[in-house]
Amino acid sequence: MAEFRTIKGTHDLLPDELSNWRRIESTIHSIMEQYGYGEIKTPVFESTELFVRSIGTDTDIVNKEMYSWTDQGGNALTLKPELTAPVVRAYLQHQLGNKNPLQRLWYFDSLFRRERPQKGRQRQFYQFGAEAIGSPHPEQDAEIIAMAYNIYKTFDIQEMNVRLNSIGSKEIRLIYLDKLRISLAKKSNVLCANCQTRIEKNALRVFDCKNPECQKLLDENAPLIFDSISEDDRKHFDTACLMLDNMGIPYFHDKKLVRGLDYYSHTTFEITSSALGAQDALCGGGRYNGLIEQLGGKSTPAVGFAAGVERLILAIDKQENSVNPPDIYLISLGEEAVVTASKLASDLRNICGKTVLLETLRRSLKAQMREAGRCGAMKTIIIGEDELAQNKVIVKNMASGSQQEIPMADITRFF
Ligand code: HAM
């Protein structure tokens, strides 16, 4: 047993997994480019204040989950628990809005939240996501939702549910929160201790609670924010829905979907998959029209989403979860054959563009053949003493079992 192990809620990515990750990342990259999004990377840590001001003081993330510390210079710092705030910070710092009134940005990065680890929930995890900053119109909401949905479709994820809602503008929310507070206060004794304090501090966050009693009270007593939004906000929501209908994207209007971060306004959405178990959210997002101004910029509308990479991988059929098999496994027997095989492997990679695994453990023929089968090689090339003496190799097709002899000089032409 190793003396040191990964910290609870973190994990190593070993070669078998990482090759799958690379494939997934490159598919996501191509889809993001297809929609005209440019990639952005922000630092691993930012000022704590950025997250407190963006996500909100009474949220689970800020209250309980951030990895924060004060450095030797007295600066309050935090490992990023989400990416929307850092992207907006970068947008403002580099005045990206002056370069183009609409900035389409995407990311693939790792995040940190001190949550209780379980399947699909880690303390260090990866997200991919996109932020479209500049357009107030529903076609931008529809584009973001469609892009997230199409990424999952590309990976052939089954049993997906898209849930959608609108929580309207910040002004409406203040009026609605009064109504919510009054209705919950009447039966506040049935709420959990956490929600009793939430009523006063930020009643909308009661919707984030997992306690069944709190959810029951919301179902029975609470007014829903969608019923308070303005006519214009309703029209915005209906148009976004119409666009999704036209694209053939199925969704469900879930009036309780308010999302657990304070920066949201108007459209909110989540995509879940019943294949995932308890942590069933594949991704979530929505509009955050007030955030850029809140962080010191001029009022700018924006919408985006983020998705857990580990959850996407859990949802992808396990069948696909393997390393790409090599084209050729190169078997050599005897010291002289090894020298020839090493040159041949290099030629097959450089001249023919093949994926080649070269035996370097000098195992027996039987053991090398077994290894070629285990890693799923399409073909094996065998070079033993006899082949070397006759200046030829044996090429074996692993699927059919058929073998042929090829002169050494013709081998690159053959492949
Ligand atoms: P979020 O809902 O906090 O939203 O996270 C988005 C996704 O990240 C979740 O749906 C889930 O797939 C994944 N996720 C969250 N926490 C964990 C965890 N502990 N372990 C593994 N996966 C996790 C946001 O982060 C917003 N910034 C989304 C957004 C972008 N809104 C607008 N733009």
Image: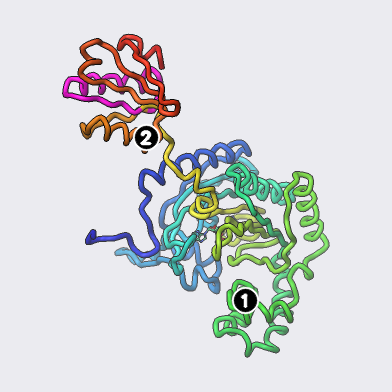
Q: Quadrant for ligand 1?
A: bottom right
Q: Nearer the viewer, residue 70 or 120?
A: 120
Residue 373's tag is: 2
Residue at 62% of width from left, 82% of height from top?
200
Would you say 59 lies left or right of 118 here?
right
Mark 1 residue type: Val
Residue at 25% of width from left, 25% of height from top?
332
Q: Which residue is mark 1?
A: 206
Would you say 381 lies left or right of 378 here?
left
Residue 304's tag is: none
Q: Secondary structure at mark 2?
A: helix
Would you say 73 lies left or right of 123 here?
left
Query: Is residue 344 one of those drawn in magenta?
Result: yes
Quadrant of the image for the C terminus?
top left
For the record, the magenta segment spans 329-355
Q: Is residue 54 above or below residue 341?
A: below
Q: Earlier in the sequence, mark 1 or mark 2?
A: 1
Q: Secondary structure at mark 1?
A: helix
Q: Is residue 331 above or below residue 37?
A: above
Q: Nearer the viewer, residue 292 or 263?
A: 263
Image coords of residue 245 (percent x, y): 78, 49
Q: Quadrant of residue 78?
A: bottom left
Residue at 47% of width from left, 65% of height from top?
49
Mark 2 residue type: Gly
Distance of label 1 from label 2 (alpha carbons): 55 Å
